[in-house]
Image (spheres, grey):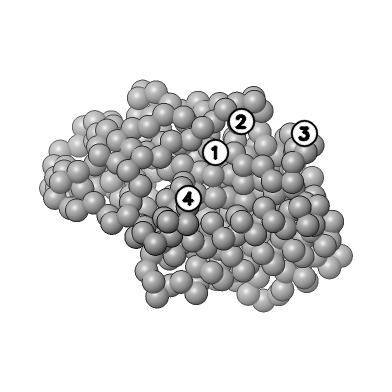
């Protein structure tokens, strides 16, 4: 297939790009001219690159047709002052892609969603305080537009709602890489909240395989809007998962649970219903403690190598 991919220089997008190229798809990548390409530099000769800050979405479609758009680009604005960038990146940009793509014959639009959007599920919840509220609203609004426009334009909108993803290539500013770095360097102590939040932790390789499963069976999708929850289908507390990291490398770092307050509006529990993905023949491979710890040890080795070069 001819596929247009956004967010390929990021954590999730780079792993999806790897699978797409491996499967023989013709891939074009939308990025910014200043994007850090270290995650995908070994694929540069195997895909076409477009710098969206230098051309318009319309120019990308001139003389080029695509069967599918996979949208992974996102902006995690955490403060109210970043609301405009949240709207620009998470709503206006993908809306441009969706509308132009539909007008140019694109049949499928695969959107990357987040478990954060579960925070706002009613009119009443809009008045409550939520963690990363601006980011969450922008993601929800695009999903709602996608659902509406898919019927209007006759394009299949597939929503992939990801749970808490971890694995190699993630940003050092994220929670799991931070803990890995702290524990592997045997920091004296790490301040943490109570750690009672329940999360569905899923490895990035399982996420990429979920996208692969959906892409391989796009012709089976009849509905204008389809949503898949992407996780393992089980929860662990943050305390339990951090414990797996800590024990995997026998770290001497003291885990100071309860030293930090819980984030206001943070979800207390999130778990994926993976029934629909299983119907496509997909299931997560990294679920048990031993498998998770093996992946974490590999992640620790990568982290240590990156800091030694």
Mark 2 element type: helix
For the residue pair 148 and 181, the one nearer the viewer reads as 148
Q: Is residue 269 left or right of residue 58?
A: left
Mark 1 touches mark 4? (CB < 8 Å): no
Mark yes or no: residue 137 visible.
Answer: yes
Looking at the image, tell me whether mark 4 or mark 3 is earlier in sequence order: 4
Mark 1 element type: strand
- Mark 4 vs mark 3, foreground winner is 4
Query: Which residue is the site of mark 3?
Result: 220
Mark 4 element type: loop
Mark 2 touches mark 1? (CB < 8 Å): yes
- How far is mark 4 from mark 3, CA to CA? 29 Å
**Which percent across, then down, holds residue 177?**
35, 48
Corner quadrant of residue 7: bottom right
Marker disc for residue 276? 2
Label 3 Cα crowd, 10 Å radius (few <14 / some 14-19 / many 20+): few
Identify the residue at image location x=63%, y=74%.
53
Looking at the image, tell me whether mark 1 or mark 3 is earlier in sequence order: 3
- How far is mark 1 from mark 4, CA to CA? 15 Å
**Which percent across, then down, holds residue 127?**
39, 62
Marker disc for residue 229? 1
Query: Which residue is the site of mark 4?
Result: 121
- Mark 1 vs mark 4, foreground winner is 4
Identify the residue at image location x=35%, y=47%.
267
Is 206 located above or below residue 99 in the figure?
A: above
């Amino acid at each position: 297939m001819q596929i247009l991919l956004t967010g390929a220089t990021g954590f999730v997008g780079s792993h999806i790009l790897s699978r797409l190229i491996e499967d023989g798809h013709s891939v074009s990548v939308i990025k910014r001219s200043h994007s850090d390409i270290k995650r995908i530099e070994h694929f540069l000769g195997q895909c076409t690159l477009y710098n969206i800050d230098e051309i318009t979405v319309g120019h990308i479609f001139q003389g080029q047709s695509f069967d599918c758009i996979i949208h992974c680009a996102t902006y995690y604005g955490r403060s109210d002052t970043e609301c405009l960038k949240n709207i620009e990146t998470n709503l206006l940009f993908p809306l441009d892609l969706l509308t132009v793509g539909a007008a140019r014959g694109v049949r499928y639009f695969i959107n990357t969603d987040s478990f954060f959007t579960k925070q706002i599920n009613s009119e009443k919840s809009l008045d409550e305080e939520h963690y990363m509220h601006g980011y969450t609203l922008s993601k929800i609004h695009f999903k709602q537009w996608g659902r509406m426009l898919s019927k209007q334009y006759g394009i299949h909108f597939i929503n992939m709602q990801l749970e808490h993803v971890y694995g190699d290539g993630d940003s050092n500013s994220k929670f799991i890489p931070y803990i890995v770095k702290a524990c592997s360097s045997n920091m004296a102590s790490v301040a943490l909240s109570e750690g009672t939040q329940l999360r569905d932790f899923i490895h990035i390789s399982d996420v990429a395989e979920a996208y692969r499963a959906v892409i391989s069976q796009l012709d089976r999708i009849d509905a204008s809007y389809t949503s898949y929850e992407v996780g393992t289908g089980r929860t662990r507390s943050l305390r339990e998962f951090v414990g797996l990291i800590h024990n995997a490398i026998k770290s001497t770092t003291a885990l100071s649970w309860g030293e930090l307050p819980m984030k206001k509006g943070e979800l207390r529990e999130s778990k994926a219903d993976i029934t629909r993905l299983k119907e496509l023949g997909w299931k997560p491979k990294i679920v048990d403690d031993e498998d998770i710890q093996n992946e974490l040890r590999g992640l620790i080795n990568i982290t240590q190598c990156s800091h030694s070069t």
